Image (cartoon, rainbow, N blue to C red):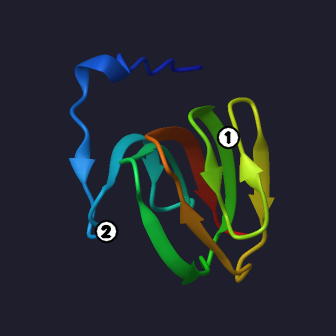
Amino acid sequence: MTTNRYLKTHDVAWEATETPGFWVKCLHEDKDKGESTWLMKSDAGFASPPHAHTDFEEVFILEGEFFDGEQTLGPGDYVAREPGAMHEGSSDAEVIMLVSYRKR
């Protein structure tokens, strides 16, 4: 049996993260499978230092522009990163992106 899960994201409040100026909305999380999907938003002028994740990461830009240390990504742009791939993040204006992580 297939189950559908619907979420009206405009009804979900943005949650502050440990990084000032960076906000999230959890869309999906399955800790047993090591999967998560998030809407992420950064305030104008946001910058994060170089870092890497232990999971495979996919990023799809919905609104604004985001510089990841190598390229500036805009609406409709996508990047996938293998675990351990170094990157950073910054934006001059607010940016909203869809980000998913999964174990490899």
Residue depicted at 49% across the width and 62% down the height = 32
Q: CA distance from mark 1 to mark 2?
A: 20 Å
Q: Position of residue 102 (x, y in %)?
A: 64, 60
> In the displayed structure, would residue 39 be above or below residue 63?
below
Residue underneath mark 1: 60
Residue underneath mark 2: 19
Name the amino acid type tagged 2: Thr
When asked about the image quadrant of residue 104, the answer is bottom right
Q: Residues within 10 Å of mark 1 (few under 14, many from 20)?
A: some
Residue depicted at 57% across the width and 82% down the height = 51
Name the amino acid type tagged 1: Phe
Looking at the image, tell me whether mark 1 or mark 2 is earlier in sequence order: 2
Q: Position of residue 87 (x, y in %)?
A: 67, 74
Q: Residues within 10 Å of mark 2 (few under 14, many from 20)?
A: few
Residue depicted at 24% across the width and 19% down the height = 11
Q: Nearer the viewer, residue 84 or 76?
A: 76
Label 2 near label 1: C-beta < 8 Å?
Answer: no
Q: Position of residue 38 (x, y in %)?
A: 47, 44
| Quarter the N terminus occupies | top right
When asked about the image quadrant of residue 80, the answer is bottom right
Disc 1 element = strand
> In the displayed structure, would residue 98 be above or below residue 12?
below
Disc 2 element = loop
Residue 87 left/right relative to 40: right
